[in-house]
């Protein structure tokens, strides 16, 4: 069975982040990876669901992102849930630190992809947690739009 490689394009999406958080701003960041991590990502194997970004010692780290072990690597395997440093300019990190300092703000990864040059990039979202009422309102809006689409198709 042939394995398909992802040379550029989307590797992983974090759909749960858009459900649980109100995304206020997005930005793109590079990510420091080892060779076996890149090879595993090129096979499309990654999970962002429980991942989040945190500032430590003036740098931004992606925590709890799961990249499974690459079977082709011998004894140079990576730790699957290690902290991975995100590559941002100092002023971007300062802006994020100021935003995180506000109540209820966090930085979550929205997607992981390879750009046109083949570099792994992470789309980060500056997010504020939704309350139960906000989630119910979103569901009501989505159901109303579906109902409108059904009526428009029926009248057609």
Image (cartoon, grey):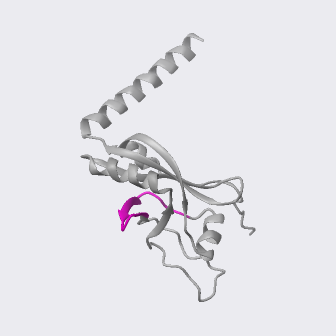
Q: Residue at x 56, y 70 (%)?
A: 33
Q: Residue furthest right?
A: 2
Side of 63 where 118 appears, left or right = right
Instruction: Please provide percent x and percent y for residue 24.
Output: 40, 39
Q: Residue furthest front?
A: 91
Quadrant of the frame with the C terminus: top right
Based on the picture, tell me whether residue 52 belongs to the magenta stretch.
yes
Can residue 37 be seen from the camera position used here?
Answer: yes
Instruction: Please provide percent x and percent y for residue 73.
Output: 64, 82
Instruction: Please provide percent x and percent y for residue 114.
Output: 64, 57
Q: Residue furthest top?
A: 155
Q: Relative to residue 64, is residue 156 depicted above or below?
A: above
Q: Residue at x 35, y 53 (%)?
A: 97
Q: Residue at x 36, y 68 (%)?
A: 57
Q: Which residues are drawn in magenta?
A: 46-61
Q: In front: 61, or 97?
A: 97
Side of 42 where 98 appears, left or right = left
Q: In front: 149, or 102?
A: 102
Q: Residue at x 55, y 76 (%)?
A: 69
Q: In front: 132, or 154?
A: 132
How many numbered marks have been drawn onto this rendered protein structure?
0
Based on the picture, tell me whether residue 156 belongs to the magenta stretch.
no
Q: Quadrant of residue 140?
A: top left
Q: Relative to residue 142, is residue 24 depicted above or below?
A: below
Q: Residue furthest bottom?
A: 75
Side of 152 where 147 appears, left or right = left
Q: Relative to residue 62, is residue 108 depicted above or below?
A: above
Q: Relative to residue 84, is residue 77 depicted above or below?
A: below
Side of 146 where 4 appears, left or right = right
């Amino acid at each position: 069975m042939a394995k398909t490689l992802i040379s550029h394009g989307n590797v992983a999406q974090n759909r749960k982040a858009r459900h649980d958080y109100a995304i206020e701003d997005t930005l793109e960041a590079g990510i420091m990876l080892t060779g076996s991590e890149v090879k595993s990502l090129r096979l499309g194997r990654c999970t962002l669901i429980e991942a989040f970004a945190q500032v430590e010692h003036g740098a931004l780290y992606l925590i709890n992102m799961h990249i499974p072990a690459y079977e082709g690597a011998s004894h140079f395997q990576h730790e699957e849930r290690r902290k991975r440093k995100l590559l941002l300019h100092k002023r971007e990190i300062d802006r994020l630190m100021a935003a995180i300092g506000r109540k209820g703000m966090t930085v979550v990864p929205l997607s992981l992809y390879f750009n046109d040059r083949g570099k792994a990039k992470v789309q980060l979202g500056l997010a504020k947690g939704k309350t139960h009422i906000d989630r119910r309102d979103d569901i009501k809006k989505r159901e109303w739009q579906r109902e409108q689409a059904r009526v428009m198709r029926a009248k057609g």
